[in-house]
Image (cartoon, rainbow, N blue to C red):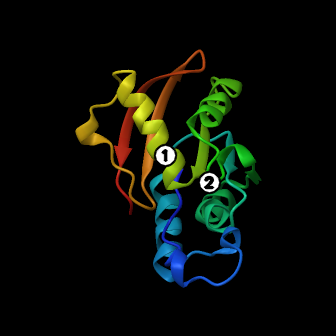
Amino acid sequence: MVRHAKAGDRDAWEGDDRQRPLTKSGWRQADALAESLQKEPIDKILSSPYVRCVQTVEPLARKRNLAVEPTPDLQEGAGAGRTLSLIKQHSGKQLVLCTHGDVVEELLERLIAMGILPRARANAEKGSTWVLEEKGGTITGAKYQPAP
């Protein structure tokens, strides 16, 4: 699970926030994400339909010759429940999920409540990644990778 890369200041953006793109440093993070995942098996790339999320995983998709599949289940406000449903629906698959801070934070709260993650390790900086392990559609482990 990837929190989208840097996309500039929400308050300074004029227009539909769903169209807010990555900044130059955000694009650097997106390219670095593609490099950091180059040896990982990936079956599918799912993303919030917001431009900044799709752009975050575009370099990875190009390198892997995969499509970025937008889904409202990962958009702002979708909640962790919808993310957990996606994971269960794709059990056994190697997914990259790109979403927003509120969704990541809600998922981390659930992992804390389940005893999978200590609160002190619940980081969610822009461009960071959580490698989630699942068995039978249930998350069994989580490892944090800081933003590049």
Residue 98 picture location, percent across and down: 59, 52
Secondary-structure class at tag 1: helix
Circles 1 and 2: CB atoms closer than 8 Å: no
Tag 1: Cα neighbours inside 10 Å, few (<14), some, or many (≥20)? many
Q: Could you tell which of marks 1 and 2 lies nearer the N-terminus?
A: 2
**Relative to residue 142, is residue 14 depicted above or below?**
below
The tag on residue 76 is 2
> What's under tag 2, amino acid-wise?
Glu
**Front one among 54 and 83:** 83
Say which residue appears at 42% left-offset and 38% top-offset.
Answer: 108
Residue 110 picture location, percent across and down: 44, 30
Say which residue appears at 46% left-offset and 65% top-offset.
Answer: 32
> What's under tag 1, amino acid-wise?
Val
Separation (CA) of disc 1 from disc 2? 10 Å
**Relative to residue 138, is residue 80 depicted above or below?**
below
The tag on residue 104 is 1
Marks 1, 2: nearer the viewer = 2
Residue extending furthest left? 120
Say which residue appears at 33% left-offset and 48% top-offset.
Answer: 123
Tag 2: Cα neighbours inside 10 Å, few (<14), some, or many (≥20)? some
Residue 20 picture location, percent across and down: 64, 75
**Front one among 13 and 88:** 13
- In this orientation, does residue 38 appear? no
Residue 131 picture location, percent across and down: 45, 39
Secondary-structure class at tag 2: loop
Q: Quadrant of residue 111?
A: top left
The quadrant of the image that shows the C terminus is: bottom left
Left or right of 147, for residue 69: right
- In this orientation, does residue 57 appear? yes
**Relative to residue 3, is residue 111 depicted above or below?**
above
